[in-house]
Amino acid sequence: MEVVALKDVKARITTDLYISGKFVRGAGAPAASITNPYDNSEICKIAPASEEQVDAAIDAAHSAFKHPSWKRLTGRERGVLLHRLADLLRRDVEAFATIESIDTGIPIRETRMEIATSAIHLEYFAGLAGKIEGAYQDLGTRFNYTRREPFGVIGQIVPWNTPLKLMARGFGAAVACGNTMVVKPSIVAPLSILRFSELVDEAGFPEGTINVITGAGRTVGKRIVEHPKVRKIIFTGGTEGGREILRQAAYTITPAVLELGGKGPIIVDEHIDWAETLDGVLTQAFARKAEVCFAGTRLFLPAKIHDKFVADLAAMAERIPMGNPLDGKTQLGPLMTPERLDDILKQVNAAETAGAKVYCGGKKELGAGLAKGNFIRPTIVTDVQPDMAVARDELFGPVLCVTPYRQIDEAITMANDSDFGLASYVWSNDIRVSHHIAQELESGNVFLNAYGYQSEIPFGGYKLSGIGREHGSEAMHEYTQVKSVTVGLDRFKSRFEI
């Protein structure tokens, strides 16, 4: 497939903020340089929001929440707006895919799927917007009913990896529930979400309901989290970032939905379809450069099949095509920044020093046309002990740690010996074994002979992997709060004898 010309991509870029229905230049400083991970060239500069612009965005969302043009919309009418937004996104899928690829380094064959999935997220929650229900209890001389009501202004802080898709899930659910939004994309990769604000405007959302501003987390993000008019926070990112969000939100007692880090275990049983399991593990370990928190990064193999499985897996990993993310043939793109590449290489080297073996990969890729980018070959590290840093820390890159086991319960114990508990994977054709493992794993999500979440599947973590659930009808509970109303049926009599 022909590579998209970079000049054509740049013509589709939006650099303005979107506040109260208007596109404005950021008034903060300094301007951030947005770079292409493929060759680390500058794409554009974006001025962040000033402190006054952050406040203006929050005030606009707060006023819009109380305004009849939004407050009186039925759930079905909010669903119509989300459906319209999904249609516009699907119409512009190629523009968004190319922007996302140069901004994040994800191959365009995948960003096309991610943009399409983002539209599906919006459609899914559009369908739930008119189905928000309360409950009723008969109390004899009284009855009680509950209403699920929106919080108000929700601040959404979006990470740099697959930003549009990770925004769409929380955004779709929160808007479907009747909240208004202030969205802050990462200063590292804001381009697809800034462009998304144009679709919000075109879709006809009431003025001020949706606002998009950018800037650093420690300034703009902090002001959003600490602002008294922001009633809830959506944050996807690292565990340290989640801790900081909770510290900042403590003063205003602002609740948060947090999807944080992961160190996903993959447990392979002896009873498997060999080819299918190789395909599955390859995808779980290396898809999207493993710059995703639900990547499978720790592989536990039966000792009797360990050597052959690793050899076959490495042979497949070494054949994954690397190159320009805008080339349709590319299947593995560059890491986000040179700093991330350097950090991962240091951690792999440290593992080797500690006694692990780098079976394949583990070096910066210097092949033709790749030397300027942040490329690393898929890396498999064997002889990994569970207490090694490489087996415990989230590397956020295509590095798979392999450890053999002899009994399945030994594998489960090692899998659970982690501070994280986001996504876990099991490969087994024995239904009893697979369900036993699923029951015992300390993880918010377990995939049996499968990979990939979707709109209908509740998604979130145990332990340091987060708080709350995205996706599915569970998400509608995250973005509504319960109001209890009790009604007396008999004439009320005072308890005081006066």
Image (cartoon, rainbow, N blue to C red):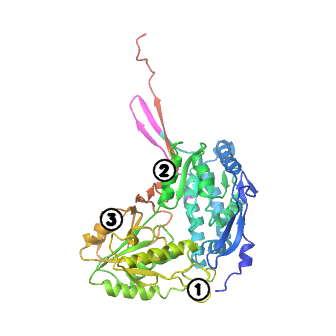
The residue furthest front is 353
Judging by the rendered image, the residue that carries numbered circle 2 is 477
- Is residue 139 within the magenta segment? yes
Measured Cα–Cα span from mark 2 to mark 1: 41 Å
Vertical relation: 466 (above or below) 111? above
Q: Which residue is the site of mark 3?
A: 416
Element type at marker 3? helix
Judged left or right of residue 95, residue 335 is left
Q: Quadrant of residue 191?
A: bottom right
- Identified by mark 3, the residue type is Asn
> Does residue 113 show up?
no
Q: Give the residue at mark 1.
A: 329
Residue type at mark 1 is Lys
Query: Which comes before the other along the chain, label 3 or label 1?
Result: 1
Q: Residues within 10 Å of mark 2 (few under 14, many from 20)?
A: many
Residue 401 left/right relative to 63:
left
Q: Secondary structure at mark 2?
A: helix
- Mark 2 belongs to which amino acid? His
Q: Which residues are magenta?
A: 122-145
Name the element at disc 1. loop
Label 3 to label 2: alpha-carbon separation: 28 Å
Residue 431 x, y percent position in the rendering:
29, 72
Q: Residue 157: image x %, image y %?
A: 58, 57
On the image, the x and y values in percent for residue 235 come to 53, 56
Q: Nearer the viewer, residue 405 or 371?
A: 371
Q: Is residue 475 left or right of residue 184?
A: left
Query: Disc 2 or disc 1, which is closer to the eye?
Result: 1
Q: Position of residue 194 (x, y in %)?
A: 68, 62
Of pointers 2 and 1, the one earlier in the residue sequence: 1
Q: Residue at x 48, y 54 (%)?
A: 243
